[in-house]
Image: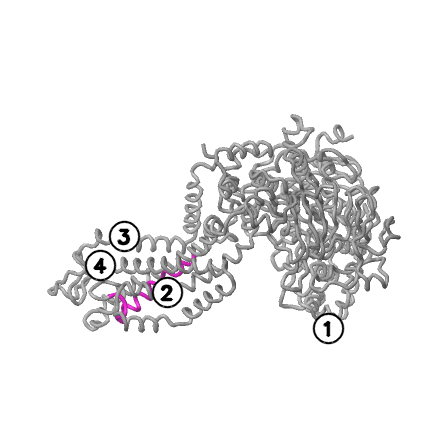
Amino acid sequence: MEAASSPLVRIRHLSLDAATARGDAHILRDLSLDVGRGRILGIVGESGSGKSTLASVLLRLLPGNISRLDGEVLFDGVDLLKLGPDAMNAYRGTRIAMIFQDPMTALNPLFTVGTHLVDVMRRRDPGLSRVEALAKGEAMLTTVGIPDPALRMQAYPHQLSGGMRQRIMIAMALLVQPDLLIADEPTTALDATVEAQIVELFEHLREKFAGSIMFISHHLGLVAELCDDLCVMYGGVIVESGPVDAVLAKPGHPYTRALLDCEIDDDGEGRLVSIPGDVPDPVAALTACVFAPRCAHAIDICRADVPLLAAVAPNHLSACLRASEVLP
Amino acid sequence: MSIAAPASQSGTLAEVLGVFRRIASTFTGTMGLFIVAMVISAAIFAPWITPYDPDALDVMRRFQNPSATHWLGTDHLGRDLFSRLIMGSRIAMAVALSAIAIAMITGTLLGIAAASLPAHIERIILILFDVIASFPSLVLALAVVAVFGPSTQLVVVIVAVTLIPVFGRVARAQVLTINNAPYIEAERLLGASYARIVVSHLLPNIAGPLVVLASMEIPVVITIEAGLSFIGLGVRPPLASWGTLIYDGYAYLSDSKLPVIIASSALGLATLGFTLFGEALRDAVDPRLNRDH
Amino acid sequence: MTAPFIEISDVDVVFGGRLRALDGINLTLDKGDILGLVGESGSGKTTLCKVLMGLARPTSGRITVAGETLTEIFARDAFSFRRRAQMLLQDAVASLSPRMRIGALVEEPLKIHDLPLAEGRLRIRMLLQRLGLPENTLGKYPHQVSGGQARRIAILRALVLTPDIIVADEPTAGLDVSVQGDLLNLMLDLHGEFGLTYLIVSHNLNVIRRITSRTAVMYLGQIVEESPTKALFKAPAHPYTAALLSTNPTVDPAKRRARIVIKGEIPSVVNPPSGCRFHTRCPNAVTRCSGEAPELRDMGEGRRVRCHFPLQAVPAMAAE
């Protein structure tokens, strides 16, 4: 692999708290993570794991009730958390782009598809003429598999189906050629056959798109099919990360193992598996392994201190003290 | 033993206290709360806090300046202005609250009916709302007063009627939204009658926006009452309404400006207070702004 | 042969004169069946549930439960049907009235049906334990419980009335994987313990595969395939079913099917394609498919398919 080149994104000790009526909720707890250049990183976690908040931090699009934001988010060597609002704005939509679960939230209902496409290109390249931009936009619509692109350029967002809108979002993201594309559950709201089309589109993107992709999903199977690397989050903590095949073939953390066991097996019989217990309370401070209360293998040392991410194999990290012992 | 949670009242109480806490958490909200509390206590305790009979004449002491005996001075008939002002708050609140209560109850019932009954009945109710809303309240007041003569009760009725469409339309819109909510469908699946759904599930869930609307309408009604009384179509002298106070003061402006200034200030302050309170209440119950859980 | 427990015969539902949400639905359920219903937006699966629950009226056709039509049942005693057939809505949290405590919500069915409270409360206590809900849940409000708990509360509300038919719309939608297994186990256990007949709607093929005994696949208001679940997943007969199954992402690379990506979007129900409704997107479509609408044909072994050129042999083809 490209061990020599530095990763595109290097997150170090990222912590984020949000004020609630019950006190400060620890949404992200001391995260450290790299996004490799040209890699597709899948971020998997259940509700409350903090995976969507992580995406918001990268774009610095945070709600108003943030009470603490510590650590470093180095994007190509620049700490995004230290940038002023204008400097950060220059990154958004040019070097970092995002695709949302509901594309309607990101498209302006008053503008046509063509205007959206021209606008994103002009943000990157203000000198571009409108005629030129429209031509490039139309070509891109063909690339993302939209039939009758000339006609669709005149359409307004509400005249398009959900799948079509998601394709427009992807076209917009590709036109700006960002270094990092963040996709937050981009197929969750779509019907199965349309979801398959978008997944296929993402697979084709790998050839056309030079940047890195951060693919956030609750769906382990989808991430397994699409991504190079995998990062598993639980209760605001990264519990495991590594190449997707390695992690899924030989998980290094009991939570990942348990999640895989919960996946309904194709031809299995008998009882279905679930993880007993509740998700951790975000308000409580972390003094032990975040998964210990629900872990079948937890012993005293797991409850004594917060385990740090450590290598269980090359490029494969796990935050479990007993990884080699209980997951041989 | 009942399975239903004990002291289900405490949940509602905690909720109400929470709303007040959020209102008091902003400067304007605290101001509004303070003024509203002042006006309402003045209205409730008027007979005990007025130092003089508000209608007692004392022609020897006309147009007195504020002093230790008459805190705000006296008017053209020597009546104690402070006492009349306090009584005025009582009339203003009585008119506002009764008119809004009538409008809220009638409007809500009509709104629910419009949202729930067949389309042709809905049409009739909506046309009724439109007719009332397009009728200028002043013209309506003139017409009604011409027939029945001015009285406080008539002010209440006129204001209530003009407010019915305001509440009715909001209630209808709320019910139309909630009618499609999964929990209403769940109740129907359990076999609940529509009457039961209205009482147990619709009313509690549309009450919030309607109460906010009511609090926003209070300053409007206070102003309308004062206005009608000022032009002689509302509260009849010698009853001390803020409107009649201004009217009386106006006639003797060359003798003393004080009565007009004091009565208008009271009217302005009360309107401001209820407006600030209403806005703070709207923000406090808005679920989008209410992040704690 | 005895009549089936639930029989849906030639049911059409047309909204506003042109939106044909259901088109000639024929389905039967025996007592104790677990039937799965699969389909995408506009397939009509939700409408079918509503028709069965008596929330929507069929434009034509009829539904019988234990030999009596729904119209007769509702004319005689609507309450009795509400006691025997219950539906779990997709959004469990939103199906609980937000300003009532759980304690009051679970007693509502008793009050609506004027059933003795004392006995009902005993049953509620029993069900609380059976569903693994802590006692203090009763004092909470719907927004204070988790998604998994909200589903159990909805199940409890349904079971208070001792029903024998349960329609579940997307029982695991929005649930985290780590808790969905528990819920499905519970639903299967309750099926046996309370003698329930299930109609389960889900877009999650893994769920359908694991807990149902028979599956019906719907597309644009029609049933395109119906089969014992095992046979359907092993060898789908309709090209649409095959495509749907192939899109199901799996973690294990060894178990992945070659993904069949069907082109285009789901057509509008208001203006469905001529002939076979799937022909605009079908990879195998020929001229005949756009002109002639296929019938739902019997393939033997309890399988039916609506396709001129099914992917599995149809033995009775000669008799066509």
- Name which residue type carries label 3: Ile
Circle 3 residue = B44
Q: CA distance from mark 4 to mark 1?
A: 73 Å
Residue corresponding to mark 2: B161
Q: Amino acid at mark 1?
A: Ser
- Seen from the viewer's position, the closer of residues A162 and A88 is A162
Q: Nearer the viewer, residue B125 or A242?
A: B125
Q: Chain of mark 4?
A: B
Please tell me whether mark 1 sits on a helix, a strand or a loop: loop
| Mark 2 vs 4: CB contact within 8 A | no
To which quarter of the image does residue C23 belong? Answer: bottom right
Secondary structure type for disc 4: helix
Are marks 4 and 1 in one subunit?
A: no
Q: Nearer the viewer, mark 2 or mark 1?
A: 2
Q: Amino acid at mark 2?
A: Val
Give the label, 4 or 1, closer to the camera: 4
Q: Secondary structure at mark 2?
A: helix
Mark 1 sits on what residue? Answer: A129
The reply to whether label 2 and label 4 mark residues of one chain is yes
Q: Nearer the viewer, residue C264 or A122?
A: C264
